[in-house]
Image: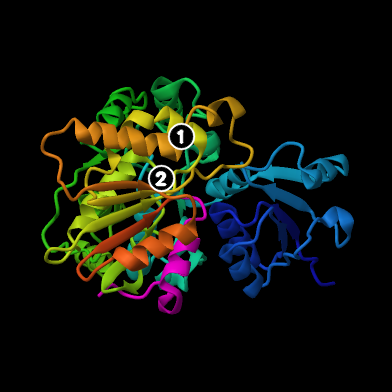
Amino acid sequence: MENKKQKIHFIGIGGIGVSALARYYLAQGAEVSGSDATENEIIEDLRKVGAKIPPSPPFIKGGGIPDLVIYSAAVRKDNPELVEARRRGIKCQKYAEALGELTKQKYTIAVSGIHGKSTTTAMIGLMMERAGLDPTVIVGTKVREWGDSNCRVGKSRHLVIEADEYDRSFLNYWPKILVLLNIEEEHLDTYTGGLPDIMKTFGKYVSRLPEDGTLIVNEEDINIAKIKNQKSKPQLKIQNYNSKAVDGLNLKITGQHNVSNANAALAVARVLGIDEKIAIEALNNFSGTWRRMEYRGLVNGAKIYDDYGHHPTEIKATLAGARELVEGKGKLWCVFQPHQYQRTYKLFDRFITAFDGADKTILLPIYSVSGREKASIKKKVSSEKLAEAIKTADSEQLTVSNNKEILYMKDFNETAAHLRKNLGAGDVCVIMGAGDINQLTGQLIKKHLTCFSAAV
């Protein structure tokens, strides 16, 4: 008798992490269905590989009853599908819980930290692939070397995952090798106790490593140093890395932060016994990932890049790298859509200085994240207020360039028109944010819309 296919339904399947796990189960032969509040290109990609995602989804209105329901951390407890699944006694797991079960079955390498997780996870996966280790990789972005997929399914026991700190998700994971990139304030709707809360949770996470595990840490991060010094397992191996480029490392992707990410990946290579020449070759051939300084085309001779950055530290690092690409007397533009009112409010003072590296900055309205916003906070902060605060701060600096410009624009149409009129040859324009701002990129470049084309 033929074995029955496992039926798995994903709620919030358009999320980048959830969709990667859906791809994994599709590759295992499971029957995958899903639903989401909005359509996006991730959902379109999943349909092409066999996921059943009808326009008006819920399985409660028809279709086969799943064996398992996996839902995104962003899904509310009163979601109709989730409520109905629990009423029927169907097993329900958060994405992190489901992935956590997989980490127990595999030799898991988890990449953690506030910034750089996706890029470093992709680097490690590609490096291991080149070395013949055939890993399974679940990453929070699309990787062009894997057919623009966020999941690579290998046949070995190795699993490489991006271990997110939001919703304390990483506490569900059980890695053998834990890569810790950086720690600072972020996701303050989860970590209401601020940095002490974040530090305590990361400390708890690190303590999950087995006695024969390995902790790979950025020795230049002061918060990581505090956690490293608190380790309670004497047999636990610790490997340090820093941001200094090693001999032979010549990355295609820009920015000192990516040199640091590459060094973290090389530290993993040493633990796994991968030949350093093979590892460096893989890193040098890495052409970047979806929405991480992704080159999208030219407008008036200006290079247009799409980026997912949404935290002040990420903005600064990305703009520093983008400055390397400006030609001649060209200008560096940053078009930014703040992501979530609470983040913008809590980190407001840091956002004021985040755009110092740009010559021209355009701020769009804050992208509201469903289920994560408080009405009281939304009244206190706006992109208009942020633009005015940046202007005030700049006016107090006597060294500020006369050509520096901070603008607020109400929508994508106004912004696209302004860019088409004012961008020039030699300019670099980074369109940045974690909301739907990548739609502006497509609107702006139109016929030049070629995903993952190589930068000129």
Residue placed most toward the observer, 187 or 50: 187
For mark 2, what is the residue?
Answer: 310
First of labels 2, 1 by sequence position = 2
Q: Is residue 381 magenta?
A: no
Residue placed most toward the observer, 44 or 30: 44
Q: Can residue 269 be spotted in the picture? A: no
Placement of the C terminus among the 4 image quadrants: bottom left
Where disc 2 sits, the SS reads loop
Of the residues shown, which amino acid type is indicated by label 1? Arg
Q: In x, y percent, where is residue 78?
A: 77, 37
Instruction: Give the residue at x 25% y 29%.
Output: 222
Q: Are marks 2 and 1 in contact (CB under 8 Å)?
A: yes
Instruction: Give the residue at x 45% y 71%.
Output: 146
Which mark, residue 343? 1
Q: Is residue 438 magenta?
A: yes
Extreme-bottom residue of the structure: 447
Q: In which quarter of the view is residue 415 placed?
A: bottom left
Which mark, residue 43? none
Q: Which residues are magenta?
A: 434-456
Please say if 205 is above or below 110: above
Q: In x, y percent, where is residue 177?
A: 38, 45
Of the residues shown, which amino acid type is indicated by label 2? His
Instruction: Give the residue at x 46% y 68%.
Output: 442
Please say if 84 is above or below 381: below
Where disc 1 sits, the SS reads helix
Q: In x, y percent, where is residue 16?
A: 54, 55
Distance (Cα) linking label 2 and label 1: 9 Å
